[in-house]
Image (spheres, helix red, strand yellow):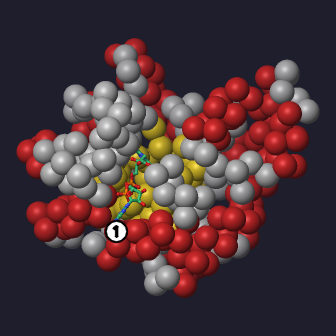
Amino acid sequence: MRVTNILNQNRETGTASFSFEYFVPKTSQGVQNLYERMDRMRDLQPLFIDITWNAGGSKSDNLTTELVAKSHSKFGLNTCMHLTCADMSHEVIDQALKEAYTGGCRSILALRGDAPTDNEKWDGAAGEFRYARDLVAYIREKYGDHFEIGVAGYPEGHPEEADADVMIAHLKDKVDAGASFVITQMFYDVDNFLSWVDRCRAAGIAVPIVPGIMPITSYASFLRRATWCQVNVPKPFLAALEAVKDDDNAVKDVGNQLVFDMCERILAAGIYHLHFYTMNLEKSTRAVVERLGLAPAHLRA
Ligand SMILES: Cc1cc2nc3c(=O)[nH]c(=O)nc-3n(C[C@H](O)[C@H](O)[C@H](O)COP(=O)(O)OP(=O)(O)OC[C@H]3O[C@@H](n4cnc5c(N)ncnc54)[C@H](O)[C@@H]3O)c2cc1C
């Protein structure tokens, strides 16, 4: 099953689908917990899941490719592998792609990655790949159409480039290099997201654009992530959470409602796929998917 085909079909038929991102745990216990969570959450029937690549800028130890292969072989999940290229040699990229290929993976989210944490002066110029578009072109050159390639989009700009229009031009470069879908950075400002999608379309980006949705599990983590990703939090949204910030259960309830409202608006605007940043947690993502009526019928009864 090709993800891009389903996303395109969704647009034609008005059918909604969703997917889950998981990050690579740091401990073996974390890995075990993640497998159990993936196994439980597959009852929701996500269109695909994806696994991050050494997020944080440290070198990979190939746990990503292991997780990708196992989620595919053990749980039958259609799995997209993130792959970053900043400060990576062709040799390391080749190895990762080979492992993805042999592990049954058919979809790569091609990213530049952040600057290595141990090199503050890094600007990417010395690496073998400078931008994500170079990785997209490389994968296409080596593997033809075997992999579907997704790329990252930034409705509110990027820490290195605040001008969203310049980012749109760079996004178009990535699509022109061979990407067939876009997954966005998390956001809470739906108006801005929808107008950004219109601007992407006007710039000639015709591939499916998938909104990245970050469920709210605690007040502290909500603030930390919104600050880290430099995203705007609309005032009423922030006020609703601030009003309950000392009550963890109320934050979860209000957060689920806010995220549900966001998702409803996005779906109503004709964007039919939602990508949840699960942060390897289950309950909030599950609650929102179920409330949206997107869970399989037997779970809705
Ligand atoms: C959906 C999603 C998933 C992610 N998953 C991971 C992950 O698994 N692991 C991880 O480490 N990080 C991940 N990231 C973070 C990502 O690696 C960083 O945001 C990184 O800084 C940019 O990656 P990119 O692929 O968008 O880079 P690019 O598209 O290459 O852009 C990087 C910077 O270069 C600029 N640029 C691009 N092209 C050009 C050009 N032609 N000329 C001049 N400037 C240009 C852009 O404006 C931008 O400022 C993810 C981000 C998103 C949105």
Q: Is residue 281 shown above or below 96? A: above
Q: Is residue 288 shown above or below 217? A: below
Is ligand 1 less than 8 Å from the beta carbon at label 1? yes
Q: Residue drawn at (63%, 38%), measured in percent from left and top? A: 227
Spot occupied by residue 91 in the image (x, y as percentages of width and height): 8, 45
* Residue 149 in which image quadrant: bottom left
Q: Residue drawn at (31%, 58%), measured in percent from left and top? A: 132
Q: Residue drawn at (64%, 32%), measured in percent from left and top? A: 224
Q: Is residue 158 left or right of residue 56?
A: right
- Check disc 1 and give the amino acid type: Lys
* Residue 32 in which image quadrant: top left
80 or 13, nearer to the observer:
80
Q: Say if residue 217 shows up in the picture.
A: no
Spot occupied by residue 247 in the image (x, y as percentages of width and height): 85, 22
128 or 294, nearer to the observer:
128
Q: Residue drawn at (42%, 20%), measured in percent from left and top? A: 30
Spot occupied by residue 198 in the image (x, y as percentages of width and height): 61, 78
Q: Is residue 87 left or right of residue 216?
A: left
Q: Is residue 192 left or right of residue 39?
A: right
Q: Is residue 214 shown above or below 162? A: above
